[in-house]
Image: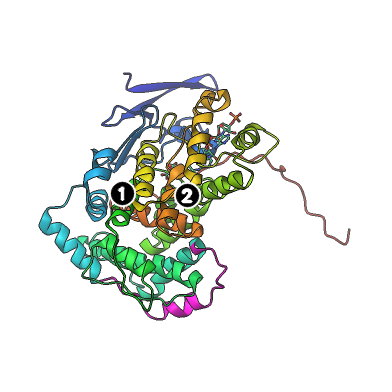
């Protein structure tokens, strides 16, 4: 493999070095491009061909459908790991020892209370507010109650900010849901595991004990692991670029939540359920929706299908599909929506439009079916995605800051009016 690239422009040839990753991916290093070509840049809407950084956190191969966190396969981690172990792995680079995991969890528990004044902020929202907007606002508000910015040169300070947001975020997630349901905003129970505690905060009724259901605990643990990181996706790139201005961790995560909210990104898991419900209401007519998805004059897209990087099965979708069957069977739930989803997948995988464009089910296609079986309201689906993605966002933000990466500031090509003189309105 060549370790240089030659570019000829304006009759001149320029040589650029390449960067080769540990999985033999190759990028052309164009950091000298403007200087050596007297101002020529590149343009790449959506950054489909452009890398923003080198990273040691997550590797994915879109053609082969491979996903690994710090070298561990997503299949192994989803099957065998605990979400907090995976969070530690993504953030600090190695799986924790038993002692380190115990200390990590204890430190998170010590940060699992939020300032009671946050209730005043959440009280100001209408019940109709989308929980992603509430979560993004409350996460940004954490800065007001924890004003000290993160001293990234201090491992101790960095560690404190990591356990602080991992402790407080699940409270905000639970409160965002209970606000909509008109339920009291409680705290969990620090004698519980991280995932069990999330479930108790979300679901405990004020006049009843909360009984954990192992099936639901295991399913949520797996779903959070599957969502934990995905290299430079839209919301993670947002967290990195906001953090690159040296904005704090909470502000950067708050921006990431807003990016994830979009229906083309994490918001797709809610849009998938709404689409499947519409198909069910339409008598299960999947063909009509397939036709809409292929009709260029129709803005409708088959939500939960397609991916910027995966041009093969999203490995997470494969695992979630199997888990959906298991959870519904174990809970004794018959959900016709799952059958509609499977029918839609089968049709799309044999339809030339989807096959030619390599459009496969992605992580969002089946996840909502499990969330619904767990009793999570559809507007909370993307909030659950954010809860899973939190360690990935933290790890990527930490890596970018520790590497002292420059502020993110892309160039552009201007195509507007050339210079013209101002005429006062009187004239
Ligand atoms: C996530 O990046 C990540 O890693 C994200 C994520 C993560 O973990 O962080 O994996 C999570 O966001 C998953 C994706 C969830 N979004 C959806 O399910 C929404 C539906 N999918 C699409 O909107 C789309 O597939 C994207 C946004 C996911 C990817 O879009 P791209 O890479 O910009 O592809 P494109 O829009 O250029 O599409 C290429 C072609 C186009 O047709 P042509 O112009 O070539 O004729 O495929 C078509 C598109 O119209 N197409 C679809 C389609 N997705 C792409 N047509 C119908 N239905 C779809 N879902």
Is 387 in the magenta? no
Q: Which stretch did the figure color magenta?
A: 111-131
Q: Main secondary structure of the magenta part?
A: loop
Q: Residues within 10 Å of mark 2 (few under 14, many from 20)?
A: many
Mark 2 highlights which residue? 266
Q: Quadrant of residue 141?
A: bottom left
Is 117 in the magenta? yes
Rendering coords of residue 401 (x, y %): 32, 53
Rendering coords of residue 399 (x, y %): 30, 50
Observer-nearest of 285 and 367: 285
Mark 1 highlights which residue? 222
1 and 2 marks in contact (CB < 8 Å): no
Is there any visible trace of residue 142 in the rendered image? yes
Q: Residue at x 49, y 30 (%)?
A: 346
Is label 1 or label 2 in front?
1
**Mark 2 CB within 8 Å of ligand 1:** yes
């Amino acid at each position: 493999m060549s370790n240089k690239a030659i570019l000829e422009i304006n009759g001149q040839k320029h040589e650029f070095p390449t960067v080769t990753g540990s999985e033999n991916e190759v990028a052309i290093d164009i950091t000298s491009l403007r200087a050596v070509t007297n101002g020529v840049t590149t343009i790449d809407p959506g950054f489909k061909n452009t890398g923003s950084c080198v990273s040691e956190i997550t590797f994915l191969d879109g053609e082969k459908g491979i996903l690994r966190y710090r070298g561990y396969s997503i299949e192994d981690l989803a099957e065998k790991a605990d979400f907090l172990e995976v969070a530690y792995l993504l953030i600090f680079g190695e799986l924790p020892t038993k002692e380190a995991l115990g200390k990590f969890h204890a430190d998170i528990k010590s940060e699992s209370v939020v300032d009671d004044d946050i209730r005043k902020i959440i009280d100001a929202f209408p019940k109709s507010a989308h929980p992603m907007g509430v979560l993004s606002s409350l996460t940004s508000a954490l800065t007001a109650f924890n004003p000290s910015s993160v001293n990234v040169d201090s491992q101790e300070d960095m560690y404190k900010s990591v356990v602080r947001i991992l402790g407080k975020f699940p409270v905000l997630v639970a409160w965002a849901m209970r606000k909509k349901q008109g339920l009291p905003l409680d705290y969990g129970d620090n004698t519980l595991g991280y995932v069990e505690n999330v479930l108790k905060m979300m679901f405990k009724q004020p006049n009843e004990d909360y009984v954990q259901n192992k099936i639901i605990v295991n399913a949520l643990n797996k779903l959070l692991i599957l969502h934990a990181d995905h290299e430079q996706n839209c919301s993670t790139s947002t967290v990195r670029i906001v953090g690159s201005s040296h904005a704090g961790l909470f502000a950067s995560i708050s921006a990431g939540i807003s990016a994830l909210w979009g229906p083309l990104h994490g918001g797709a898991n809610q849009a998938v359920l709404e689409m499947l419900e519409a198909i069910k209401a339409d008598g299960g007519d999947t063909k009509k929706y397939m036709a809409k998805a292929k009709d260029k004059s129709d803005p409708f897209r088959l939500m939960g299908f397609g991916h910027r990087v995966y041009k093969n099965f999203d490995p997470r979708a494969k695992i979630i599909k199997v888990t959906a069957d298991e959870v519904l069977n174990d809970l004794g739930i018959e959900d016709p929506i799952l059958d509609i989803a499977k029918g839609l997948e089968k049709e799309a995988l044999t339809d030339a439009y989807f096959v030619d464009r390599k459009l496969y089910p992605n992580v969002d296609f089946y996840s909502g079916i499990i969330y619904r079986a767990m009793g999570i309201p559809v507007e909370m689906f993307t909030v659950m995605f954010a809860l899973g993605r939190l360690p990935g966002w933290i790890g990527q933000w930490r890596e970018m800051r520790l590497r002292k990466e420059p502020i993110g500031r892309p160039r552009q090509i201007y195509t507007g009016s050339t210079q013209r003189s101002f005429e006062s309105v009187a004239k």
